Amino acid sequence: MTMHNPLAAGSRSGFIPSYLEALSLVERLHRLLLDVIKDEFERVGMLEVNAVQALLLFNIGDHEVTAGELKTRGYYQGSNVSYNLKKLVDMGFMHHQRCEIDRRSVRVKLTPRGREIRDVVARLFARHAEGLESRGVLGPDGIDVITTSLRRVERYWADQIRYIY
């Protein structure tokens, strides 16, 4: 008796191997992004925060948010957010305040020290964007195609969670 392997069946079309390669690339790019951020902070001698925390500060920016809002925006997973928010508050990179309406909820925003970290990441990303474009690695049309494609995958996956499981 032969077992049906959906990956083997789909591989004839070439889509499944390409899809699996794209998944692997997304995962590697995320890890590489964290390494790039870590290296930048080492280069400028700012070792108080790790790359995940620096990215969290960058994504919060000038907003005042709750941990739940960060999760729903898709930036972070549950315990990762709570742990890192607590550490950032303890280290003085963020202010926190209980919500007046829902006392269980805590709102956070960056302190001046947190904004310094955010600015280091913003300058790094601006340098990268300029370098990608000036060296012809990726232009406005190319980045738009990538972004549109990734948003479609994101919507598809979100629909799978909402409607199938």
Image (spheres, grey):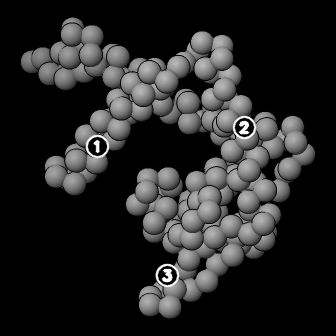
Q: Is residue 97 left or right of residue 99?
A: right
- The amino acid type found where label 2 is placed reads Leu
Instruction: Give the CA distance from mark 3 to mark 2.
Output: 32 Å
Q: Where does residue 48 sit, x and y in percent of width and height?
A: 82, 56
Please give the residue where the numbered disc 3 appears in the rendered image. Answer: 105
Q: Where does residue 125 sit, x and y in percent of width and height?
A: 66, 37
The secondary structure type at the circle numbered 2 is helix
Q: Where does residue 68 sit, x and y in percent of width and height?
A: 45, 68
Q: Which quadrant of the rendered structure holds the N terminus?
A: top left
Residue located 50% across and 53% down the image = 75
Q: Toward which corner of the image does residue 15 lie, by quadrant?
A: top left
Q: Toward which corner of the image does residue 101 lie, by quadrant?
A: bottom left
For disc 3, the neighbor class at 10 Å (few under 14, some 14 to 19, many from 20) is some
The secondary structure type at the circle numbered 3 is loop
Give the label, 3 or 2, closer to the camera: 2
Please give the residue where the numbered disc 2 appears in the rendered image. Answer: 124
Residue 155 marker: 1
In terms of sequence position, does the residue under pointer 1 or pointer 3 come before the other?
Answer: 3
Residue located 74% across and 69% down the image = 111
Give the label, 1 or 2, closer to the camera: 2
Q: Toward which corner of the image does residue 115 lie, by quadrant?
A: bottom right
Tell me, yes or no, if residue 164 can be seen here. Answer: yes
